[in-house]
Each structure stands twice: as C-alpha cells, then as structure tokens.
Image (spheres, coloured by chain):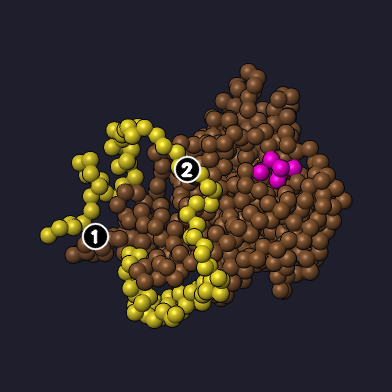
Amino acid sequence: MSIDTQTAAKVAKLARIKVDPADLPALAQEFNTILGFIEQLNEVDVTGIDPMTSVTPQRLKRRADVVTDGNQQKAILANAPDAREGFFAVPKVVE
Amino acid sequence: MMADLNKLTVAAARDGLRRGEFTAVELTESCLAAIAGAGALNAFVHHTPDIARAQAAAADVRIAAGEAPDMCGIPLGIKDLFCTKGVPSQAASAILQGFRPEYESTVTQNLFDAGAVMLGKLNMDEFAMGSSNETSTYGNVINPWKTAGGADLTPGGSSGGSAAAVAADLCLAATGTDTGGSIRQPAAFVGITGLKPTYGRCSRWGIVAFASSLDQAGPMTRDVRDCAIMLGAMCGHDPKDSTSADLPVPDFEAALTGDIRGKTIGIPKEYRMDGMPDAIEKLWADGAAMLRDAGAKIVDISLHHTKYALPAYYVIAPAEASSNLARYDGVRFGHRAKLAQGDGITEMYEKTRAEGFGKEVQRRVMVGTYVLSAGFYDAYYNRARKVRALIKRDFDEVFAAGVDAILTPATPSPAFALGSMADADPVQMYLNDVFTVTVNLAGLPGIAVPAGLDHSGLPLGLQLIGQPWGEADLLNTAYSLERAAGFVAKPVKWW
C-alpha cells in the first residue's frame, strides 16, 4: 500500500486540516513510512480472534435515566472564541 | 526554617509536618523558590503560587487539627494535561491557548481533597504525543542530568516536565499520564520512579483525552514509597468515568514489606533487542539477580506477540486520537483561526486545526483518519485490535502459569540529546516505547524504578509489570528492587 499526494490530500480533507499543496509529497512520504511499519501486523495469524473492545472485562455501570446536570450556559460559553446572546457563533452554514 | 525542604520525599515531608518540624507553608515556599531558580529547565509552564500558598495555609490548619491525610500539605506539580479549574490547561498545544477549564479533573480534585498543594502546571509533549518533550508549544524541557560537557538532553516524554521537576527537586512529586510509556520512559530518563496503574484505577475524567482505551494517570515520585502514597490519593472509583473501576483502594504503602520470598518473576526473552546498549543488558541481568537474592524465583518466559505491540499501538492510538481531537474545531473553546472574506465553516475548521495543532499531532490525527476511513477499517483498525487481544492473551497466559511480575528494561537507551532525532523518521522516535507500550495495550500496571547509571553517568531504569489490579504487590516488588539497587544519584545542579 502506497499513499500518493492525492490520497494524502484526501486524508487531510477528511481530518479537516489545511495542508499546503507544496507540503503534500513530504506528508505522503511520512504516511508511507508509518504505514510500512504498521504493515508488519499482516504477519500475525489472527484467525478466530475477536477484536479487543475492552481491556478490562467489566460491564459498564448503569444509572437511573435522569437529568443530573444542567443550567450551566455561562460556564459552557466561557471559553468560546465567539459567543453571542447565549450561543456559540460560527460563520454562516446555510445560505 | 530547615534548608532544602524541597528535596524531601513525600513520606519524609508527611512525617516532618506531623512532628511540627516545619510547616506546609515553609515547604511550599521552598519549592516556589526552587522553581523560580529553574527557569532554564522549562518544566513549569504555568505558575500558581497564590493557589499554592492558600492551599498550604489550609493544609497547616488541617494538620494542626490532626487526622490529616498523607498528602496534606505536599507540594506537587500537575501535568498540563489535567484540567484544573480556572488555571490554564493547554495539553501543551496552541489550539488550547487561553483555555481555562470551568471544572477540575477527578485526579486533581482527589489530590486537593487530600490536602495536596498545586505549585503550577508542567510542560509535556503536545497532547501527550511524543517521547522527548520536543512537540510542546511551550518549547523543550531540558533534562537536569547532563554528561560531562555534553549537549542538552531530553527528559523523555510525554511527561517530560513532570520528570524534570521531580528530578530537579522543584516539587516533591508530580502527576503524569501514560498512554504508551509517557510516565515510565521519562521517569527512567531522569532517575525517578513512575507508576502507570491498571487501566481504570484512576479516573480519566477531566484529563485531556489522547487515546481513551490506553490513557491512564499515575504518580511520578522520588521513590517507591512516595508512589504508593500518592497513588492511594489519586485513584478510586468515579461515576464520571464509565471505565473507572469500582474496586476498593488498598493501603498501598502498607503493602511495602520488602518481602518477596516465594514470588515468581518472569524475564521475557522477546525484550532482548538487537543493538541494546551493554549497560542496559547488564542492568537487566543485575536486576534479576537482586530479585533472586531477595528470595524470588526467576523464570524465563515468552510474550510471543511483543514485536507487534508498537505497530498495533500506532494504529489504535492515532485512530482514537483522530476521534478525540475532532472536538478542537474552533467553536467551543481554544483557538479559532482568523478567517478571510468568504470563508465558511469548513475553512474555519481547516485553518483552525492547521494553525493550532503541531506537526506530530497533525500527523497522528491524519494517520488515525486514514486507518479508520472506508475500505481500510478492517485491514488496519480491526486487525490491530485483534493483535491487541493476542498481546493481552500472552500476559494472561504467563500470569495464569504463576508469574507474579515481569522484569524488563524501562527504555532501550538512556536520555538522548535534544534535537538528535530531528532528521530521523517518526518511527525511530516511536521505538522509545518498545518496552512500555505492551503494558498499555494489555491494561496492566507497570512501574519504572531507577536502578543504575550508564558509562557516561546517566540514569537507567528497570520496569516491573504486574497483574491487573495488583499495584500493591507490584509496588512491594519494586520496593525490594529499589532497596537492592540502592540508587541515590542526583543530577549536579547547573541551572
């Protein structure tokens, strides 16, 4: 498996990270180095092995389905780069 | 006032405070003075002297009243990954510039409830992604250890600030976190003790998430006893973390008898790496001999899938990171890029994340995005999770066969020079975690204990790996090793 600059650009887009087109060849090269390292996993016989879902076998705890928190608008907005009238503000999303 | 209070162990400070030999305020002032004189190390990146003084004064009242917990009045450094209410908590990333949490992480809250004092926040690799503390937005941490006339060395990473601060006596102990070795590798690089507990022992709530199935907080201290004391205060069940274990917390310090007669210690043959320095090979053999002399039985064991731990880790950790770091979008907290005329929300995300994330974080988020993307999920992510199950099975089988703990080197080398890996490919840096990463994948407790010096006078550590939830027994074995190794070397002050 080899990643070309076009795939690198697609991955950057999916990750929502702007990458300068001039930097794409170097990025693709780094991906290939890392993926080459990861490819070793193909040597392992994993027949009949289930993928691990939890490292410590335990049933997640249940609790009553009730509201335990809330009314914290001020705290939630306190760190927003742009908060107006009690909302997070972002560039226009819908025309 | 006694001199050099900042050099005390947690246990000695606890006992001295109770005997009235000094106050928590004096102890804290001694650390604040040490920190003020150690700017060159770049370990503390946010200073909280006002909080520290107020907490110390409150601790003195509590100690005078009697029945104060062990950690009461003990000055600590807190890794920047822990959210601390009203205090900058940036995970050493520019994307969290200016972020002041409205809440307190469970681990720091537990420590503060026990009366501990926060001196400030400690430098680290950005989002805990790194093994040399060179990916931090605050710049490198410098290891207090140096070779004669040598270059500045890395303190290791990601908990590099925590390691340097404890080794340089800026605080009595520090919190760290460990996703692939981030407590144990830096502890070994600076000659201190660092414990990664069993996954689920410490709550992850309020700790900036990197790879949620691997992340675990732990203590970084001067010795094993301090690790036992501090772990007891940090851990415990927390309903706010669904993976936090609802198990009783034993008295870890009471477990330190030093008696390991009849214990079985495994030596895994797969940890003998090509090109490992002779000093580490010898340290490992010496460590096994010390445990044998203390009455343990040493057996050769095999952990067959060890070779595949790092490749599995470099699928699973980036995959989880790409999901966890999706929250940094410039909307709710942290940095937002300045937008050009006509930029929409997608440009806002892309520019914000390009400006806010450093190179290594971007690389891992993109690798994670790739291995989770349509068509590759089975080939990479699911395969890695199957290999992870096999790695855990290796440990299960060894423990079922009667092994109580496993002895390995902590790192494949001593601390290396800052900048020396700049031209290496990323995989070379990843190899630092070759002995530690299996422990995270299997969710086990592991401890790094300083055990000797290499030929150039730099500290080297050994790692002990214990059974799940067996921290008390593991700490006792580490205590026995510590006593036999008798490591007392300290860095010569140059800062």
What residue is shown at x 46% (from left), y 69% (from top)?
Answer: B380
- Residue B482 x %, y %: 78, 48
In the displayed structure, would residue A81 be above or below residue B75? below
Q: Residues within 10 Å of mark 2 (few under 14, many from 20)?
A: few
Is there any visible trace of residue B115 in the rendered image?
yes
Q: Nearer the viewer, residue B208 or B60?
A: B208
In the displayed structure, would residue B420 be above or below residue A89? below
Secondary structure at numbered mark 1: helix
What residue is shown at x 68% (from left), y 37% (from top)?
Answer: B252
Q: Chain of mark 1?
A: B
Q: Nearer the viewer, residue B36 or B28?
A: B28
Q: Which residue is mark 2?
A: A59
**Chain identifier matching the yellow colour in the rendered picture:** A
Q: Residues within 10 Å of mark 1 (few under 14, many from 20)?
A: some
Q: Residue B195: within the magenta? A: no
Disc number placed over residue B345 in the picture, else none: 1
Which residues, given as a range, are shown in magenta?
B470-476
What residue is shown at x 65% (from left), y 30% (from top)?
Answer: B70
What residue is shown at x 21% (from left), y 56% (from top)?
Answer: A91
Is there any visible trace of residue B7 in the rendered image?
no
Residue B119: quadrant of the picture:
top right
Residue B424: quadrant of the picture:
bottom right
The N terminus of chain B - image quarter: top right
Q: How far apart are the two marked residues, 1 and 2, measured between alpha carbons?
A: 40 Å
Q: Please identify the dominant SS of the magenta region.
A: helix
